[in-house]
Amino acid sequence: MKDFSVRPEIEDFAPYVPGMTIEQIQEKYGLNSVIKLASNENPLGASPIVQKVISRHAARAFRYPENHSPRLTAAIAKSVGVPEECILVGNGSDEIIDMLFRMKAVPGKANVVCYENSFAMYRMCAKLCGLEYREVPREAYYGLPLEAMAKAADADTAMVIVTSPDNPTGLTASVDDLALLSGALPADCLLVVDEAYIDFAWPPESYTPVQAFESFKNVVALRTFSKAYGLAGLRLGYGILPPMLAARMKNARIPFTVNLLAEEAGVAALEDEVFYNETLALVMRGREYFTKELPKLGCRVWPTQSNFVMFESPQDTAEVFEELLKRGIIIRPLKSFGLERCMRVNVGTDEENRTFIKVLGEVLNG
């Protein structure tokens, strides 16, 4: 069989490696029940209203969806408070990230600026597109190095990417800081703000530029239905973009990337304010509990505006992670982010949170 070649720079491509599933953990350790607090999923699951809508439309799965999801686009625009022509819905916000890299950057010439210990997809997309990936060191305590990012950008920089709230630290850039960074960037350079966790930031107007979108001419904001809306399995997200860029991306994209059930679920999720508010209340209560209880166990904790907490254990990270797995608790070690001493735990239900703290205490003090 012929061995088809690829570009040399992607022959050793490092794939994204997700954490183990509940089923894999149960089989490996012979467990009947497992608490998963590793993937930043909604602790309440999916809205009951959304589940009913999916069931009601399941028989239509043989039909193609309407291209570009106009009903969902209109619902998002109304919810966010921006014109419809600024919204581009995608198969997860990952699709929008991928399209931005492929449409905005010139292979072999352009560069993209990000900071270290960040979401692996940015580096993957840059490498796949043949772009220089400039990784700025973080500030002390893993802070967001916004000033250094501005200095790293030049006339060939296509995009500067900030995740806010940041994954995996939970740290967040203020609107004022983002405004300064936006104004300091070279002409034709986009400031891409990945807001996958913005629903959990409080108060939101202090952190998201979308509240004053008309004032940010070079900003793209990325959002998802995976976290606060509990639709991670349906892969649904969107970008809020300058209208001309959104129009060009619509023209260039492949058709039907958002499936019919995902669109119906997204529309229903935006209408279910009760579920959304219950999610926010649970998450904010849980992260306050974690930030109070983890230091009592000798852990160093980072302040967070997300649905997870990053912490450093007083004992070996790999050993603590493995002992938790044996007891049916899945959290996320951050070696893949380059943070070998840290772990990330997302907020679960109140009972799951208490169980995690109890079991972690047994591991650390056993």
Image: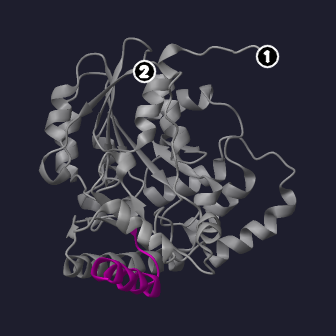
Q: Is residue 235 magenta?
A: no
Splitting the image into 4 quarters, where does residue 299 fall?
Answer: bottom left
Q: Secondary structure at mark 2?
A: loop
Q: Position of residue 326 (x, y in %)?
A: 49, 73
Residue 361: in magenta span: yes
Q: Amino acid at mark 2?
A: Ala
Q: Is residue 173 left or right of residue 21?
A: left
Mark 2, mark 1: which one is toward the viewer? 1
List x then y, in percent, for residue 232.
58, 59
How far is disc 2 from disc 1 in space, using C-alphas? 35 Å
Q: Quadrant of residue 30?
A: bottom right
Q: Earlier in the sequence, mark 2 or mark 1?
A: 1
Which amino acid type is shown beneath numbered disc 1?
Answer: Met
* The one of 129 and 27 positioned closer to us in this rendering: 27
Task: Please tell me how crowded label 1 is: few (under 14), some (14-19), or many (20+) other residues with Cα within 10 Å.
Answer: few
- Residue 105: give its label: 2
- Left or right of residue 235, residue 51 in this image: right
